[in-house]
Image (cartoon, rainbow, N blue to C red):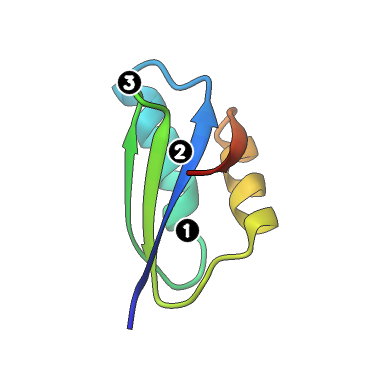
Amino acid sequence: MSITATYKVSGMSCGHCEGAVSGEISELPGVSSVKAVASTGEVTVTSETALDDEAVRTAVDEAGFELVGTV
């Protein structure tokens, strides 16, 4: 069973931003897909189990952006 969560990320403005955020989040254990959309600031993550919000926050920070919360 997979779980899908959508996060709101501030600061993404282009495809490079989407790639940076997607790349960091996709390295988290159990993540099977990540779709970041700069125009909406939404990042949809599909994973095997629920992700720890702090782990997602750290990954977004590593990419240079800010996790605002879940949608």
Callout in the foreground (2, 3): 3
Marks 3 and 1 in Cβ contact (< 8 Å) = no
* Disc 3 versus disc 1: nearer the observer: 3
- Could you tell me which secondary element the residue under label 1 belongs to? loop
Spatial CA distance of label 2 from label 1 is 10 Å
Q: What residue type is labelled 2?
A: Val
The disc at residue 59 is: none
Q: Residue at x 34, y 76 (%)?
A: 2
Q: Mark 2 points at which residue?
A: 21
- Who's the residue at 55% across and 66% down the image? 51
Q: Name the residue under label 3.
A: 39
Q: Which amino acid does label 3 sit on?
A: Ser
Left or right of residue 46, residue 12 in this image = right
Q: Using a 10 Å C-alpha cutoff, classify the residue at mark 2 as few (fewer than 14 neighbours), some (14 to 19) or many (20 or more).
A: many
Q: In this view, does 68 lie to the left or right of 40?
A: right
The residue sitting at 45% across, 22% down in the picture is 12
Which residue occupies the extreme top position in the image?
13
Secondary structure beneath dot 3 equals loop
Task: Name the residue located 59 percent from the left edge and 52 percent from the top edge.
Answer: 56
> Measured along the vertical axis of the image, is residue 46 above or below residue 68?
below
Looking at the image, is mark 2 or mark 1 nearer the viewer? 2
Please name the amino acid that badge 1 sits on: Glu
For residue 4, above or below residue 68: below
Q: Quadrant of residue 4?
A: bottom left
The residue tagged 1 is 27
Say which label, 2 or 1, has the lower sequence index.
2
